[in-house]
Amino acid sequence: MISPKAFRQTAVLALWAAGIVLQAAQETIPINEVEEAVPPYTLPEVLTFCDGRRVESARDWTRRRAELLRLFEDHVYGRVPKGLPRAPGRVVETRRDALGGKAVRQRIQVPLTRGPRPVLMDLLVYRPASATGPVPVFLGLNFDGNHTVTVETDIPLARGWVANRPRSGVTNHVAAEASRGTDTAAWPIERILGRGYGLATAYYGDIEADFNGGWRHGLRGTVAGTGPGSRFAPEDWGAISAWSWGLSRALDQLARDPAIDAGKVAVIGHSRLGKTALWTGARDPRFALVIANESGEGGAALARRFFGETTLRINTSFPHWFNGRFKDYNHRVPDLPVDQHELVALVAPRPVYIASAEQDRWADPKGEYLSGWHAGPVYRLLGREGLPGPDLPALNRSVGDSVGYHVRTGAHALTGADWEFYLDFADRHLRRDSR
Ligand code: GTR
C-alpha cells in the first residue's frame, strides 16, 4: 500500500511533469497574430444542408437549424444527457432594502441533480425596487463567486473550488473574504437597475470546477458517477455544455417569478463564459437576446481563420471545455463540419451581440466580427438585418441591427463601456413595445 506521504509526493511530481509536457506542447503549437499572414479559408455554407440542398425558406431553416445544432453538439460542445431534473429552486433570502433601497435582492438555490446531496447553483437576483411591472433581465455566469460581483458584503462566499486569480487575493482555491466585491467593474449592477433591468448571476464553479478533471467536482461527475469506470463518450458534454445547462435552469427559475419578464431575458458572458453564453443562446431559444463579450476561439471567432488562439491550442490548454470529438480536428480544422458563424446563426432571428477588445488579439477581433457578418444570410432570410459589411468598424462604435458588434479600446475584460452598448442594444430590442 502506498503511504499518504508517498502518494502526495507522486501526485506533486506527476503534476509537475504534466505541467512541463503541457508547456512544451504549447510552445510548439503554431500561432499567428499577423493579419497579412492569415491563409485563405473557405467557410461551410450556412444555408446549405449537409446533403447539398439549399435552404430556400424559413421553413427549410428550421430543419437546417436542427441539423447544425446536432453538429455543434456532436463535434464541438457535446450532448447533454437526457432526463436531467429541472426542479424548482428554494428561495433562501429576499431583501427589499438591498443596495440602499434601490433593489429587491433574492438568493435562490437551484438543484441541478437529484439525490440527497444535489449539485446546487446559487442564483443571485437583483431587480429595481421601483419597477411597476415584470422587468427584463440580464443573466450571466460569473468567474469568482456571487460575493465578488456586488458591493454588498452579506452574500455568502462561493462554496467549493475557486480559481487562483491574483486580483482576488485568493491563493488556496477557496473563496476568501478579501475577494468580496473584486469583480464589480464587470457587473455594474446599479447602472443596470437604473436602466430598468434586473441582473441575475450565478458562479460557474457551482456547476462545475474549471480545470481538466474538474468534471469530478460538479454536474457532469454527479450525473455520470466518478468511479473508476466512469468516462465520457466522444459526443458527451464538455464543461461549456454543463455551464450552459446551468444557465437554462437559471432561466427556468427566473420564469417562476412574476416580477420578471421571462420572455425578455438576455444571456451574457465574457471570454470562456462568452463561449458559454453563445452556446446557450443557440441551444435554448427561450433566451430573447444573446451577448458574447470577447468570446474568442470556440465562441464567436471563426475557427478556420488562423489568427490568435486555435483549435489545437484551446484543446491543449483547456481539453475539458469541449467534447472528445472536437480533439479530432486539432490538425484538420477545415474538416470541421461547422464554423462559428453558424453558431451565431443559430440565435437568429433573435438579436445577438458580439464584442471584441482592440488589445485582445488572442480572441481575434476580426474573426469575431466576421462570424457575425457571415451569419447575415440567415438573419436576412428571417427578415432581419445583420451587420453592415465585411469590414471591422471603427473603435468604440456599435454597429449592426439584429446582429450587434463593437470593438472597444483596451484589453480583455467585461467593462462598464461594454455594458453601455449592451444596455442600448437591449433597449432597442427588448423594450420596443414598452415605449
Ligand atoms: C484564455 C483562453 C481563451 C479565453 C480566456 C478566458 O486563456 O485561451 O479562450 O476563454 O482564457 O476565458 O479568460
Image (spheres, helix red, strand yellow):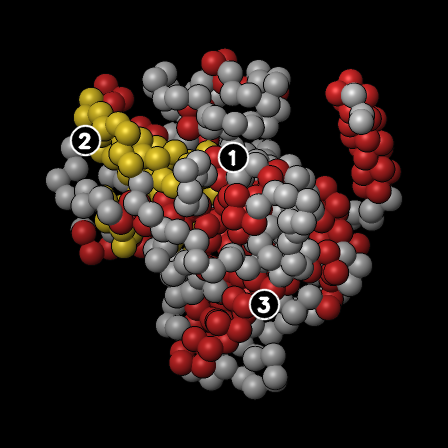
Q: Quadrant of the N terminus?
A: top right
The amino acid sitting under disc 3 is Leu
Disc 2/disc 3 C-alpha distance (Å): 43 Å
Disc 1/disc 3 C-alpha distance (Å): 27 Å
Q: Residue at 33%, 47% (x, y): give it.
A: 87
Which residue in the structure is indicated by mark 2?
129
Which residue in the structure is indicated by mark 3?
71
Q: Is residue 6 left or right of residue 108?
A: right
Which residue in the structure is indicated by mark 1?
205
Labels 2 and 3: the sequence-earlier one: 3
Q: Nearer the viewer, residue 117 or 174?
A: 117
* Residue 132 lies in quadrant: top left
Q: Residue at 34%, 17% (x, y): give it.
A: 154
User: Is there a contact, CB below 8 Å, between mark 2 and mark 3?
Assistant: no
Residue 426 location (% of width, % of height): 33, 48
Please determine whether, in this image, residue 392 is positioned above or below residue 357: below
User: Is there a contact, CB below 8 Å, between mark 2 and mark 1?
Assistant: no
Labels 1 and 3: the sequence-earlier one: 3
Residue 227 location (% of width, % of height): 63, 43
Q: Secondary structure at mark 3?
A: helix
Labels 2 and 1: the sequence-earlier one: 2
Q: Secondary structure at mark 1?
A: helix
Q: Is residue 312 left or right of residue 106?
A: right
Q: Residue at 67%, 49% (x, y): give it.
A: 229
The amino acid sitting under disc 2 is Ala
* Residue 304 lies in quadrant: bottom right
